[in-house]
Image: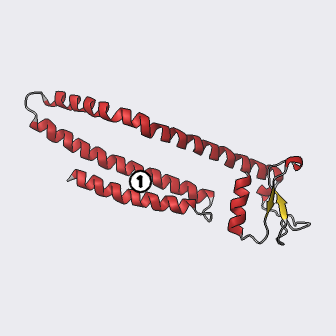
Amino acid sequence: KEVVRALLITSTSLSMIFGLIKVAELDITENAMDHAIRKMVQALGILIGFSWEKAFDVAVASITEEVTFLPGPMTKLLLAFFIGILVIPAWRKYILPTILEYDEIEEEEEQREEGVEAKREAMGAGDGKVSPLSEPLLDRSPGSQVISPGSSPGKAKKLSIGAMDSVTLKKKYKECK
């Protein structure tokens, strides 16, 4: 009964996680929305973990009742060691590197976001006032070029923006970063 429940929760949660990841990958979502989606994915992962913990707990209790040649606590201890011997090597090989990589990526994103916010505040954009432009930022005529942000004028990488739509332009901008 508990294993069936854990399988149902796992399959439902995984389908929700894949859907949330697809939404987070869209260019229309903002940083706050992406952060909320990551938290929802983490919560679903915890839900999956707790459902399987309950299934393992019921299985260990059932095995402990059936084994009569060892006392109950000794049977539970041996089962815990056996499960640990099976699970820990796989966890270290497959799950731990992924978690460490994910933590590194999140830390870099947080630092980048803090840097952008600090730059906005330093430039005075934090006060909500917008100064008018003296000339257009982009010339959208075919064959026009724009210098990529963050590059020095001598080593500027030029983009041909021609008649691009805004989604393609955003992708090109991200490639230049």
Q: Residue at x 12, y 28 (%)?
A: 71
The tally of labels here is 1
Q: How is the image coloured?
A: secondary structure
For residue 55, side relative to residue 68 (left or right): right
- The part of the image, by quadrant, that contains residue 58 is top left
127 or 150: which is nearer to us? Answer: 150
The image quarter containing residue 87 is: top left
Residue 141 is situated, as x and y percent measured from the top left of the image, at: 84, 72
Image location (x, y in percent) of residue 55: 25, 47
Task: Return the residue found at the far right.
Answer: 134
Q: Residue at horizontal 20%, vertical 43%?
A: 59
Residue sitting at 36 percent across and 33 percent down? 88
| Quarter location, residue 94 | top left
- Residue toward you, 165 or 1: 165
Q: Nearer the viewer, residue 126 or 55?
A: 55
Residue 157 vs residue 56, the one in the foreground: 157
Classify 13 as above or below 168: above
Q: Secondary structure at mark 1?
A: helix
> Tag 1: Cα neighbours inside 10 Å, few (<14), some, or many (≥20)?
some
Query: On the picture, is 28 further left or further right than 37?
Result: right
Identify the residue at horizontal 18%, vertical 27% (top origin). Answer: 74
The three-letter code of the residue at mark 1 reads Leu
User: In this rendering, would 68 be left or right of 95?
Assistant: left
Residue that lies at the very extreme toward the front in this rendered image: 143
**Residue that numbered label 1 is attached to:** 44
Above or below: residue 122 compared with residue 15: above
Instruction: Indicate the position of residue 26 as horizontal and vertical percent values.
Output: 58, 63
